[in-house]
Image (spheres, rainbow, N blue to C red):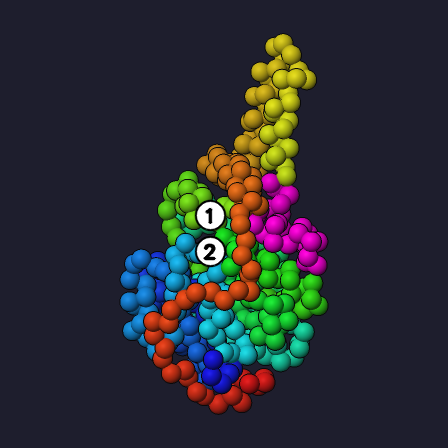
Amino acid sequence: MSEPLALSIIIKALNEERNIAGAIESALAALEGYDGEVILADSASTDRTVEIACRYPIRVVTLEQPSERSCGIGAQLGYQHSRGDFVCIIDGDMRLHRGFLEAALAVMAREPRVAGVGGLILEQDTSNVEFEARQARDEPDRRAGSVSRLDCGGLYRREAIEAVGYFTDRNLHGGEELDLGARLHAAGWSLTRIDRPAIDHYGHSGGDFRLLLRRFRNKTAFAAGEVFRASVGRAHFPLMFRNNNGFTLCLIVHLWWLTILATPFLIHGWLLPVALATLVAFPFVAMGLKWRSIRYAAYAVSAWNLYAVCFWFGLLRRRVRPDARIASRILADAVPSRRSSSQIGLRV
């Protein structure tokens, strides 16, 4: 690559023709006044995503092999082509808020061991039960303050990424932010989320169970097994267990299955069908009472079972070196913005 820049904004996308123009325009607007670039890291889209992106003054890169698609490969692909001392990552269905980068860079200027800064995530689509529940939950990692990971993107310091070897693990179909956060924390860095809107998220709408089917087809449901395998034997493994309730959930579901299977050997007579019915119904009833929704209970328990089954698919998948260069093509390469680096207030 040629001389470094101050900022790189990476937009990772797959078939985002509906949202990509908004994402790119928000990134270009956020970059105004800075010495930087916008990169679209495309995972071999089959719709008009790339065609639309090439109309803008940005770099557009795409995977050579569609079979390599994953959540982790998009950010790593963009990082591979980036030059910024600071790297902001968002998805193609997001819009970056003006002013967030300035606030995030100010935090990094004050705190040299902060590897990444996120902001508040504003969910714009709650048309299915998962997005409704996500909006209702008060997740600690989505609140302002010190966090274990930066879900939905954020601004990272290249120095910190280089220290841990690579940006995101290309083998992961989900949980890449968790993996990155754990690696950074294990290396002595920290992450924080500031009390300022960072992105609007326009998630994919659709039916509840259609979403689960899509996650099985695109292997997102394999993520728990993949991140488990990626962290075994490494320094960040304890942090993965502490910060990822997906592992615990998979363990609980497996214990539930084993309890149901063992029940016929422990209970006999008329009590057996009662015991089995109680065991099968228990999680549905518990979630229904917690959320006061039969719809959510059915979805949640179905999702748990899917992820528990897919844990094994992810655990047994073949891995490639996460820092290996990704085969890609540059489809457009606009001249980056050249602005005064003094406006950033950090090393350029």
What's under tag 1, amino acid-wise? Lys
Label placed on residue 67:
none
Residue 89 in view in this figure = no
Residue 41 in view in this figure = yes
Looking at the rendered structure, the secondary structure element under dot 2 is loop
Residue 111 occupies quadrant? bottom right
Residue at 55 percent across and 61 percent down: it is 322
Magenta-drawn stretch contains 117 = no
Front in this rendered view, residue 138 or 258: 258
Front in this rendered view, residue 55 or 152: 55
Q: Are marks 2 and 1 in contact (CB under 8 Å)?
A: yes
Dot 2, crowdedness within 10 Å: few (<14), some or many (≥20)?
many
Residue farthest toward the top in the current orientation of the protein: 269
Q: Is residue 240 above or below residue 108?
A: above
Residue at 47 percent across and 83 percent down: it is 2
Residue at 61 percent across and 24 percent down: it is 261
Label placed on residue 219:
1
Q: Is residue 200 above or below residue 340?
A: above
Q: Quadrant of the C terminus?
A: bottom right
Magenta-drawn stretch contains 234 = yes
Q: Name the residue that disc number 2 marks.
A: 70
Residue at 56 percent across and 31 percent down: it is 285
Q: What is the chief secondary structure element of the magenta stretch?
A: helix
**Apparent side of residue 79 relative to residue 114 in the rendered image (left or right):** left
Q: Is residue 266 above or below residue 99?
A: above
Residue 35: % across, % down: 47, 84
What's under tag 2, amino acid-wise? Ser
In the image, the segment drawn in magenta is 224-250
Dot 1, crowdedness within 10 Å: few (<14), some or many (≥20)?
some
Of callouts 2 and 1, which one flags the residue occurring earlier in the amino acid sequence? 2
Looking at the rendered structure, the secondary structure element under dot 1 is loop
Residue 25: % across, % down: 37, 72
